[in-house]
Image (tube, coloured by chain):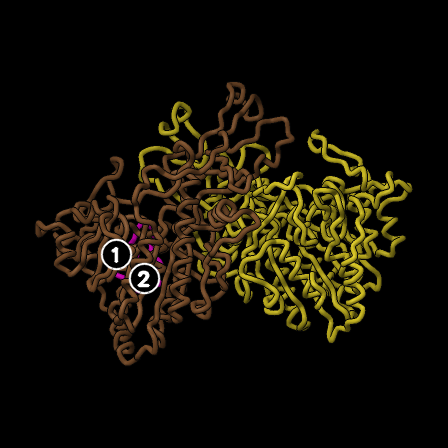
Chain colours: A yellow, B brown
Amino acid sequence: MRFVFCGFLALSCCIYASLSNASPRNLILIIGDGFDDQHVTMGRNYLSGMQGALVLDTLPYRASVQVETISDKGQPLYVADSANTATSLATGGITNIGRIATDISDNDLPTIGERAIASGYRVGLVTTSSLTDATPAAFLTHVSARSCEGPEEVLGSTYYGIPQPACPDDARDNGGPGSIIEQLVASSAHVLLGGGSDYVQQLTIDGESVEDAARRAGFVIVNRDTNLDSLVSDKPILGTFDGGTLEVRWRGAGGRIAEPTETSWLNALSDYLGETTEPEPMVCEPNPDYGNTPSLASMSGAALRHLSRENDIGFFLMIESASIDKQSHKRNPCGSIGEIQQLEETLSLAMAFAQTHPDTAIIVTADHAQAAQILPEPTLYSKYPVPIYSPGLTARVHTPEGGTMRINYATNNGFSEEHTGANVPLFANDVAAPLLKPFMRQREVHDAMSHFLFRNVDP
Amino acid sequence: MRFVFCGFLALSCCIYASLSNASPRNLILIIGDGFDDQHVTMGRNYLSGMQGALVLDTLPYRASVQVETISDKGQPLYVADSANTATSLATGGITNIGRIATDISDNDLPTIGERAIASGYRVGLVTTSSLTDATPAAFLTHVSARSCEGPEEVLGSTYYGIPQPACPDDARDNGGPGSIIEQLVASSAHVLLGGGSDYVQQLTIDGESVEDAARRAGFVIVNRDTNLDSLVSDKPILGTFDGGTLEVRWRGAGGRIAEPTETSWLNALSDYLGETTEPEPMVCEPNPDYGNTPSLASMSGAALRHLSRENDIGFFLMIESASIDKQSHKRNPCGSIGEIQQLEETLSLAMAFAQTHPDTAIIVTADHAQAAQILPEPTLYSKYPVPIYSPGLTARVHTPEGGTMRINYATNNGFSEEHTGANVPLFANDVAAPLLKPFMRQREVHDAMSHFLFRNVDP
C-alpha cells in the first residue's frame, strides 16, 4: 500500500457531520462468494424444487453486475478473483487479481467500511471464511496481496510449497500498518465474526499476539464457548471460530465429491468406443466435521443485535457466505448447496430485521462466477450409440423432490477449479432498489451503497 | 398431438371481440437461443469491451427466468432443450424435451401465436434457424417431436444414422394436421422469415410442394432475390433463405473453433507431468460462407413494416437469434458472438420501432443456458509448476480492446456440447416492464405476454 491523501474522504466526513439522520440508516451487504446463476439455480432446485423459489427470489429487485478486472498493466482481464472483486465492491475501484483495496500502482483505495466508521456508523464483517480472507479484508484493510493474512505471512509465505506474494510495504517491520489481521483489529470495526483464529494467535513484531492487540484496542474476544444468541456487549466484538475457513454444513454422502467417469480400455483408444460408467448418484448429508460451528445466521444475528443496539446513526454490515465458492473449487456440490442454504437463512434474518428497522437496505450479490454447471441427466445425446460423458468431473445429486441434478466441474485438470467470467446476479429489497440499475458494474454497486450511507455526498 | 377443446381459447376470443384497442398493441419477443449470462458477458466483452455496455444493458428492466422441464412421467428435469422451453414461452405449459406445444400426454397446448391470430393480431416469426426448428415451431404448431419438420420427416427420419422420433398422430397420412412446415403455412401467420427451404420444397401427400400449398394459402413467397428493405405486400409473406439454418456472420480466423490442449507424452502418464500447449489465440473474422444471407435485423425490419402497415389492432412478432446456441454446440465462440451482434442490431431496430409506436412491448430472453464458460487467461494457478489446462476444448479469442477471452467447452466428449441448467436472463422495455417480476418461471413469461395482448382475459 502507499497512502494517498484523500481529499474526498475528508470532505465526506465534513459534509456528513452537518447531516443528522432522522432514523438509523442500515446497510446489509450479503455476498455469496462464487454465487453465479448456475449456483443460484443449483440451490433453488435442491432447496426449493425446480418449481419452487428461494427467499432470494422473493426480493423485489434484481440486476446483473459486470465484473471488471485489470492486469498490472491496466489491460482488461475477463475473469476475476475474490480480492479484486471485493475491492471493487468496497472501494469503487478496479484492480488486479489478488489486490486488497489497493490499485495497480499500490495506492490505497478508501473503503466503504472505513468511510462508514469515519462517518459515525458502526461497521461489522461476518464471514464463513477466515476474517483475513480476501472478501472481508477488502472492506477494512489495504495490502498489495491477499496472501498477507497475518504477521507470519506479510513478508512472504508458501502454499503447498509455492511461494506466495509478500507485502513488504505493508509490513509493520517496514513502517506499514501490518498484515490483514493486524489492520482489521486496528480498524475500529464493531463486529468481526468468522474463521481465522490461526491468524489471531500469531505474534506481532511487538511480541504480543494479535488477540492481545485486539483486547488492547477494546475488543471483547468471543469463541465457540460464547452463546452468540445472548451475547450483549458495549464493546466491539471479535470472534474467530476456526483456524481458517469454518467447516461447511453439508457434504456428499460418505464425503463423495465429483468424480471422473470410468472408462473401459476400448474407450482409451477412442472416445467413441467402449463402455463408460458415470459416478453413481449421491445424496447430500450433514458434514460430521461441522460440529458446533456457528451458523452464518447465528453470527449475523449477533452482529445485527450488536450493531443496532442503542444506535441512532446506523450501521454497515458485510456478510459473506464464502464456501459456496470454496466448495465449488473442491468440486463438492453438496458443500456449496449447504452454504447457499446458510445464505438463505441469513437473508431471511436480514429481511426480518428490516421489517422492524425501516431504513435498512439489503443487497445480495456474488463477487464472481464459478465453475459448476448443471448438465442434462441423461446427456442430450443418450440415444447415440457412443459413450457421451463429461471430460471433467461429475456429481449426480439426488434432490429431495426426486430428481437428479448432474453437476459438471471441468474448468481444469488440477486440484482446484477455476472461476469463470459471467456477470453475476444482484438482489435487493425495496429500500435499496431506488439506488440500483438493471445493469451495473461492480464498482457502481459500491457507488450506490456509498450514496445510501453518505447521502448527498457523491460516492 | 391430440386436440382438446379449449374453452378458454374460445372465451378469450369472445372477450377480445368486445374490446377495442385505443391504439395498435404490439409485442416483440426476441429469443437468444442459449443466450445465458456467460454468453451475454462474452458478447459484452467482445462487442463493447469489459467496461462497455450492450444495447441490452440499456433496457430499463431485467429479470431472471427459471427454466422448467419434466420427463414423460412428470418428474423434474434440470436441463431443457429449445423445444420444451419454447413450448413454455409460447403456451405457459411445462413439457418434456423435444415436444412442440404438446404436453406429456400429447395434448395440444394453445399457443400465444394462435390466440393472437384468433384475436385479430397479425403474427410473425423471424429466425436465423430453419422456420421448422423448435423455437419458431412452438409458437404456431403442435407435434409430439421436434424432428417432424417436414412431410418427409413426420413419419420418421434419421440424423447421422440415428433414428429420430416420428409423429404418427400428427401426420396428414393419419388425418393429422401435418408436419411443422405444413402446420406453419396453414397457420394464418402474416410473416414467416428464416431458413428452411429444404422443408418448403418437400411434397405433401397431395403431391404438391409445401411452397405451392403456401401460395394456395395466400402467401407471397420471397427469397434471396427479394429486396427485403423495399418489400411491400398486402398478403402474408413466407421467406426461406437457406436450406436449413442460415449461415452465421462470423467465424474464428481460418475456420478455427475451440481445440484441445496439446500434451506431451509425459503428461499422458500423469496430469501433473510434462508440457502442455494451449491453442494459439485467434481473432474473429467474417464467415466467407455468409454471402448475401439476410441479416436478422433486415428480416426483422421487413417483418415490422409488414406487420404494422395499416394495422390498427397490433401484432405479435417472435424473433430468434438461433445460432448463439448452435455455434456453442459447435464450440465456435466467434460464431456465437457474431449472432449476439445480430441480436443486438435487431434489438436496436425494435427499440427504434417502439419509439414511434408507443404501445410496443419488447421482451428479450434466452430459452436455456448453454455450454460456454469464460475462463481466466492465464489460469488462476499459473504459478504452480504443473500443467493446468481445461480437460475440454479451449478457444482464446483476442478482443478488439486488446484482451484475450479464454472460452471453455467441456460439457461432453462428443460431437456437440450439452445445454446447461442455469436460470436465464430477461430484459424488457418500459412498456413490458409492468407485466414482469424480478424472478419468473418461463411459463409466467408467457402469462405476462398473454396478459399484454389479451388484456383483461386471464392468461
Query: What residue sits right under mark 1 in the picture?
Result: B192
- Residue B259, percent from left and from top: 44, 31
Residue at image location 75% in from the left, 53% down from the top: A110
Q: Which mark, residue B304?
A: 2
Residue B229 shown left or right of residue A405 in the figure: left
What amino acid type is highlighted by mark number 1? Leu
Total number of numbered labels?
2
Which residue, as the protein is rendered here, is positioned at the far top?
B265
- Residue B345, percent from left and from top: 41, 53
**Image quarter hosting the C terminus of chain B:** bottom left
Residue at image location 81% in from the left, 40% down from the top: A169
Residue at image location 87% in from the left, 38% down from the top: A173
Q: Nearer the viewer, residue B92 or B52?
A: B52
Q: Nearer the viewer, residue A397 or B38?
A: B38
Say if B200 sits above or below A124 in the image: above
Sooner in the amino-acid sequence: mark 2 or mark 1 = 1
Residues drawn in magenta: B90-112
- Residue A441, percent from left and from top: 59, 54
Question: What secondary structure is found at the residue carrying circle 1?
Answer: strand
Residue B190 shown left or right of residue A46 in the figure: left
* Alpha carbon distance from label 2 to label 1: 12 Å
Magenta stretch, overall SS:
loop
Snapshot quadrant of residue A18? bottom right
**Is residue B72 in sight in this rendering?**
no
